[in-house]
Amino acid sequence: MTKLARQQLIVELAHEGPLPNQQELVKMLSRRGFPVTQATLSRDINELHLVRTSEGYTLPNGDAPQEALPAVSRVVGEFVREVRRAQNLLVIKTMSGGAQPVALAVDAEGWEEVVGTVAGDDTILIITPDNASAKKLQTRLEDMRA
């Protein structure tokens, strides 16, 4: 599992409520398939700018810090294996577990070509308003893979 996917899970867990102490968080991550050392978790908490409160670790002001969302070019370059177009639809194949971070990053961009995304484990469906928009978005995503 990648650092990016692990940190995304930490942010998702933090959205559900305050995270317990680091020892409990190590156990939570391990149960979800992310075995991690306490030292690595400390670095993740620092990089994600989580705040320690009496209730546990939280996101600043309850929201994900901007740094917690990686650049779309980074996740596309790291996870995307193939971009296929079918009319106004794009089917994105990713490595296992990569669809969610890529879809999240694409959604966060607010591109006018994207009507919506649906992500599974290793496949994303992106709906665009028309064929021209799909082609433009396909080119943009493929350029990020290069």
Image: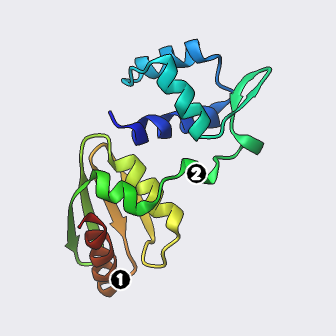
Classify residue 136 by image quadrant: bottom left
Q: Residues within 10 Å of mark 1 (few under 14, many from 20)?
A: some
Q: Quick one: which residue is furthest to the right in this view?
A: 54
Q: Locate residue 118, reporting x and y percent.
A: 38, 55
The image quadrant of residue 130 is bottom left
Q: Nearer the viewer, residue 130 or 83?
A: 83
- For the residues marked 2 and 1, what is the alpha-carbon distance in whole angstroms? 29 Å
Q: How is the image coloured?
A: rainbow
Place of residue 85 in the rendered image (x, y in percent of width and height, measured from the top left): 22, 72
Q: Which residue lies at the image location 65% right of the left edge and 40% below the top edge?
A: 49
Secondary structure beneath dot 1 equals helix
What kind of residue is marked 2? Glu
Q: Is residue 66 above or below residue 73?
A: above
Q: Earlier in the sequence, mark 2 or mark 1?
A: 2
Of 121 and 74, the residue lying toward us = 74
Number of marks present in the image shown: 2
Q: Residue at x 64, y 49 (%)?
A: 65
Q: Is residue 53 above or below residue 60?
A: above
Residue shown at 32%/33% (left/top)?
Answer: 1
Q: Is residue 52 left or right of residue 4?
A: right
Please name the residue that numbered disc 1 is placed on: 133
Image quarter hosting the C terminus: bottom left
The part of the image, by quadrant, that contains residue 18 is top right
* Amino acid at pointer 1: Ser
The residue where tag 2 is placed is 67
Relative height, residue 120 to residue 144 (above, below):
above
x 41%, y 49%: residue? 101
Report crowding for label 2: few under 14, some 14 to 19, many 20 or more residues within 10 A (C-alpha).
few
Please report contact status of discs 2 and 1: CB closer than 8 Å, yes or no: no
Q: Position of residue 68 (x, y in %)?
A: 56, 47
Q: Relative to the observer, which residue lies in front, 18 or 113?
A: 18
From the viewer's side, name the closer residue of 123 and 50.
Answer: 50
